[in-house]
Amino acid sequence: MIHRKLFRLKLPTQTLLLGKRTLIMGVLNVTPDSFSDGGKFFRAHRAVEHALSMQCAGADLIDIGAESTRPGSAGTTTLEELRRLLPVLQALRGKLKIPISIDTRKAAVAEIALGAGAAIINDVSGLKHDPRIAEVAARHRVPLILMHMRGEPRTMQKTPFARDVMKDVTHGLRASIEKARNAGVLKSQIVIDPGIGFGKSFQQNYELLDKLPELAKLGYPLLVGTSRKGFLGATLALTRKGRTRSAKPAPPEDRIWATAATVTASILRGAHIVRVHDVAEMVQVARVADCLLAPATL
C-alpha cells in the first residue's frame, strides 16, 4: 500500500490540508457543449443551484470552467468565457462556503476570476497556451494546478499518441513546473494532474492510473480527473462475447460506476484530489477508499 504524503495549500482565506483524506472537487461546466452534461448548467441560475447542491453533497472544492476542452473543441474567446463565468461567480459570492477553482487557459480570465472570488487556478494546458497564468498565480499567491495535455483539444485524440506515456507526461509536467517556478510560483502552491483523457489512448489512461506513484515522486500533490470520460465509455462498450466493441460507447451519464472504480484506483495509488461530476456518490467512494488506504481513519 502506498503512503500518501501530506501537503498544505495556502488559499487567500484558508489553508487546505491534502493527504489526510481525499478532497472532492466538483465539476461545474458553464458551457453549451460540455461532453459530460451537454450545457445542462449553461444558464447562470442553474449553475449556481448546482454549485450549492454539490457543496451540500460534500464537495470540498468547486471547479468552474467556461470553455470546453473536450476532444474536438475549438476554443472560446476571452470575452465569451468571461461573459459565461462572471455572473456565476458574482452570484455565488457570499453563498458558497467552499473554495472555487477557475478552470481556464487564459491569464486575463484567471486574473478577473480571482478578483471575483476564485481562489485556485486550474490550467489544463500546463502553461502551454498562456504562460502568463503562472505570473497571475504568483502575484495573487494562489495555488496553481498544472495538467498535462498532449496537443490541443481540437486534435489531441487524432494525432499520434506518445510511445511512452509515462515519459511523456513526466517530461511535460516537469516543463510546466519549471515555467511556474521561474514565474515565482512557490513549490508549495503547485498541484499536478496527469491529464487523463487529454491526448492519451484509452489504454494509456489505465497505465497512468496504475503508475500514479511514479508521478508522486515529482514531489507535488496529485489531482486526478477520470469522471465520465471517454475511455470509460469505450471500456463499457466492450461486449463479453469476443471482447468486441459495440457501435455506441456508454453515454457519460451511464459511466458512474466505472468512474467510481477509477476514483477508488486513483486514491489507492496516491491521488490527493479527485475531480468528479457525481459528488454525492464519489464522496462515499472516497470515504471508503480512504479507509482502505489508512484503516486508522475509521
Image (cartoon, rainbow, N blue to C red):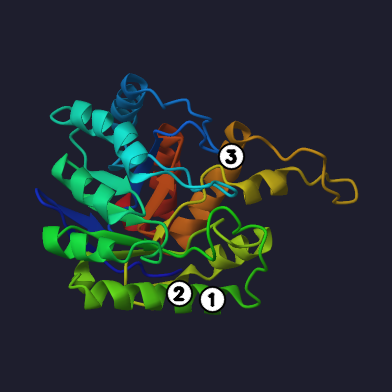
Q: CA distance from mark 3 to mark 2?
A: 30 Å
State the residue position of label 1. 168
Q: Is residue 30 above or below residue 215?
A: above
Q: Residue furthest right?
A: 242
State the residue position of label 3. 257
Give, as a three-letter code, the residue at label 3: Trp
State the residue position of label 2. 172
The answer to whether mark 2 and mark 1 are in CB contact below 8 A is yes
Give, as a three-letter code, the residue at label 1: Asp
Q: Residues within 10 Å of mark 3 (few under 14, many from 20)?
A: some
Mark 3 or 2: in front is 2
Say which element carries label 2.
Answer: helix
How far from the left and from the top, in percent, is residue 48? 30, 25
Give, as a three-letter code, the residue at label 2: Gly
Q: Residues within 10 Å of mark 1 (few under 14, many from 20)?
A: some
Say which element carries label 3.
Answer: helix
In the image, what residue occupies the spot 75% across and 43% down? 237
In the rendered structure, the answer to whether residue 14 lies left or right of residue 261 reads left
Q: Is residue 13 above or below residue 45?
A: below
The residue closer to the viewer here, 217 or 70, is 70
